[in-house]
Amino acid sequence: MKYLTFALAKGRLAKKSMKLFEQIGVTCEEMKDESSRRLIFVNEELRYRFFLAKAPDVPTYVEYGAADIGIVGRDTVLEEGRQLYEVLDLGFGKCRMCVAGPESAKELLRHHELIRVATKYPNIAKDYFYNRKHQTVEIIKLNGSIELAPIVGLSEVIVDIVETGSTLKENGLKVLEEICPLSARMVVNQVSMKLEQDRIKDIITNLKQVLVY
Ligand code: PRP
């Protein structure tokens, strides 16, 4: 039997996903050894392979079929815009994509001023401002600690993930507009969905039974 390959976004999502998979018998003992530097883990008996990747690379592996199934945040799915099927909301990793900034930026947004928007998610920001709000903005791509940008004057606002809101609060910033809700998603390669239909559908059905929304 062919291996069914899973690509998991490194970090919290991967840990939670493996716990969830364990509940439906999709397991991998090798992966539990946290000191291991191995990149790929195998369950020979059940013919599963798992690997960890940087979140933005997960949709890439799945689109090209190097992984049949991916677990990644909806933020990354939207940002990467890859050809794949989004089949299941796993219900954890819940947060929101927001426009945030100092209170004073509210007026700039309201008057559709030509503002600068710093973000790790340029495609999501572009789609929101251009297609949904019909507002022309300058988008500045950053790679982390996005909240810094309005504080040091790089941008007027940011587009970023807000979970508890404490990063914003501690830095004197506020949610100004909500773009969309986010959570962990299961994505599937379009060819695998046909060729491995039975195994993948079983996994989806079993996951739905253990998921409590
Ligand atoms: C994310 C996000 C915010 C923070 C939001 O950053 O970019 O900075 O978490 O969480 P909160 O609302 O609970 O405070 P992350 O820690 O992933 O690191 P990054 O700054 O490198 O993107």
Image (spheres, rainbow, N blue to C red):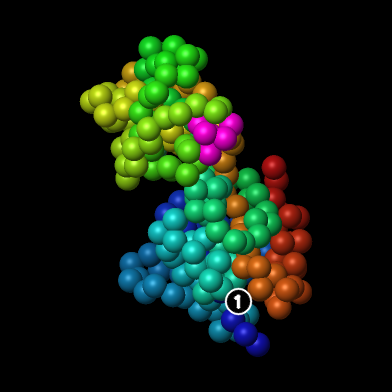
On whether residue 204 falls in the magenta region, the answer is no
Task: Indicate whether 181 appears above or below 25.
Answer: above
Residue 132 appearing in the image: yes
Task: Indicate whether 173 appears above or below 59.
Answer: above
Q: Mark 1, residues whose alpha carbon is within 10 Å: few (<14), some, or many (≥20)? A: some
On whether residue 128 falls in the magenta region, the answer is yes
Extreme residue in the left direction: 152
Drawn side of residue 129 relative to residue 152, left or right: right
The residue sitting at 70% across, 76% down in the picture is: 196
Residue 205 falls in image quadrant: bottom right
Extreme residue in the bottom direction: 1
Task: Indicate whether 179 appears above or below 50.
Answer: above
Question: Which quadrant holds the C terminus?
Answer: top right
Question: Which quadrant holds the N terminus?
Answer: bottom right
Drawn side of residue 181 relative to residue 136, left or right: right
Q: Viewer-proximal residue, 29 or 63?
A: 63
Q: Viewer-proximal residue, 153 or 173?
A: 153
Q: Which residues, given as a range, are shown in magenta?
A: 127-132
Drawn side of residue 87 relative to residue 94, left or right: right
Q: Amino acid at mark 1?
A: Leu
The x, y position of residue 2, in whole percent, is: 62, 85
- The residue identified by callout 1 is 4
**Magenta residues: mostly which secondary structure?**
helix
The residue sitting at 52% across, 74% down in the picture is: 66
Residue 96 appearing in the image: no
Where ligand 1 lies, by image quadrant?
Answer: top left
The x, y position of residue 13, in whole percent, is: 50, 53
The x, y position of residue 115, in whole percent, is: 38, 24
